[in-house]
Image (cartoon, rainbow, N blue to C red):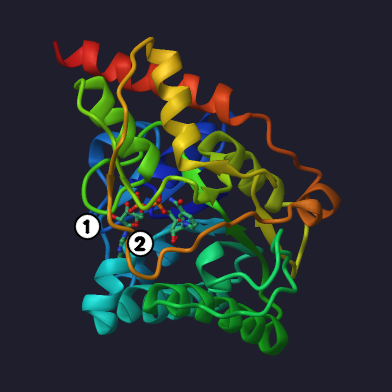
Amino acid sequence: MSILITGGAGFIGSNLVDKLIKLNKDVIVVDNLSSGDKQNINSRATLYNVDLIDNDLEEVFATNDIEYVIHLGAQVEVSSSINNPIKDSKTNIQGSINLFENCNKYNIIKVVYASSAAVYGDPIYLPINEDHPIRAMSPYGVSKYTPEKYLRYYNHEHGLDYTILRYSNVYGPRQSSIGEGGVIAIFIDRMLKNKRPIIYGDGKQSRDFIHVYDVVNANINALQKANRKKINISTRSETTINRVVKIINGLLDIDLSPLYEEKRKGDIRHSILDNSSAYRYLDWEPEYSIKEGLKQTIEYYLNQRDKKL
Ligand SMILES: NC(=O)c1ccc[n+]([C@@H]2O[C@H](COP(=O)([O-])OP(=O)(O)OC[C@H]3O[C@@H](n4cnc5c(N)ncnc54)[C@H](O)[C@@H]3O)[C@@H](O)[C@H]2O)c1
């Protein structure tokens, strides 16, 4: 009996795989390694280098006794989704449908789906709860939302169970600082090289930063709880980008002032997700404050740097 993690070579997926293996679960990973890294994958997990939209995906279901699926595999860059919405939709929408078709055919007990705060778009009110209107502003937001609708369809028509988790801004070990990356990974990478962090806008914009280990725990709880629910996974607290730089400076005992550049078009000013449903239905709460989370993340990057030396 195993758990299939799509996107298990990626930032969040690989952390989840590690935790499940620690809990003595059999873990299968499906990942086409487009943004994920083979090195991230725990040696006790089985990797299938398969694209979510390929027919070969069925082979993974046919040859393994899979009980649960946690679906994180996705095209994750907003800018790529704007430049190539067809490619984005192929992975995020068609890839998800192909996966759900197999889940249905092979009688999977449950799918836990990694959705995103991007589905809400520019918030009308804060904190954003799960009833906030869906106003996705990018093809990525649309392509993350559409599988939610398909899950409802598969449940209604075929009884496939699911939980939708909508994450806020995730950070922590293994996040990429390349490409769009996460702002925290990018700042830590630059500041460890003694380079000033670049902030687009005045830095007073805020985000709800959630540590990846908290996201991992929410996924594990969702295997047994919160059937047919959509649930925000967040800290319900906001941190400005200026404060992130200040905390990193403090933790590294340096004083690099940010370089301010022009605000990026379409950037949301403030984002906080209400997380009371997660408390209620998942019996989950975040364990990391932003300070503790940044401390842990910096330690990880320092370790990685030392290993390379
Ligand atoms: N990082 C965040 O802040 C955040 C926030 C909200 C939601 N999410 C969601 O969490 C999930 C994981 O994101 P992440 O930050 O770990 O990104 P990531 O890029 O590190 O992980 C995505 C993984 O999916 C794989 N993948 C991409 N296309 C594939 C395909 N066609 N077939 C098979 N595998 C494919 C990639 O190789 C990669 O390993 C995604 O679904 C993302 O939308 C992330």
Determine the image quadrant of residue 246. top left
Ligand 1 within 8 angstroms of badge 2 C-beta? yes
Query: Looking at the image, which residue sits at the far bottom?
Result: 157
Check disc 1 and report the residue beneath it: 34
First reached walking from the N terminus: tag 1 or tag 2: 1
Foreground mark, 1 or 2, reads 2
Ligand 1 within 8 angstroms of badge 1 C-beta? yes
Where does the image place residue 267, in percent across and percent down from the top left?
Answer: 41, 64
Q: Residue at horizontal 25%, vertical 58%?
A: 32
Amino acid tagged 1: Ser
Q: Are marks 1 and 2 in contact (CB under 8 Å)?
A: no
Amino acid tagged 2: Val
- The vertical placement of 301 against 199, above or below, is above
Query: Is 262 situated left or right of 64 in this image?
Result: left
Check disc 2 and report the residue beneath it: 76
Determine the quadrant in which ligand 1 lies: bottom left
Which is more toward the observer, 150 or 155? 150
Q: Secondary structure at mark 1?
A: loop
- The vertical placement of 42 against 180, above or below, is above
Q: Secondary structure at mark 2?
A: loop
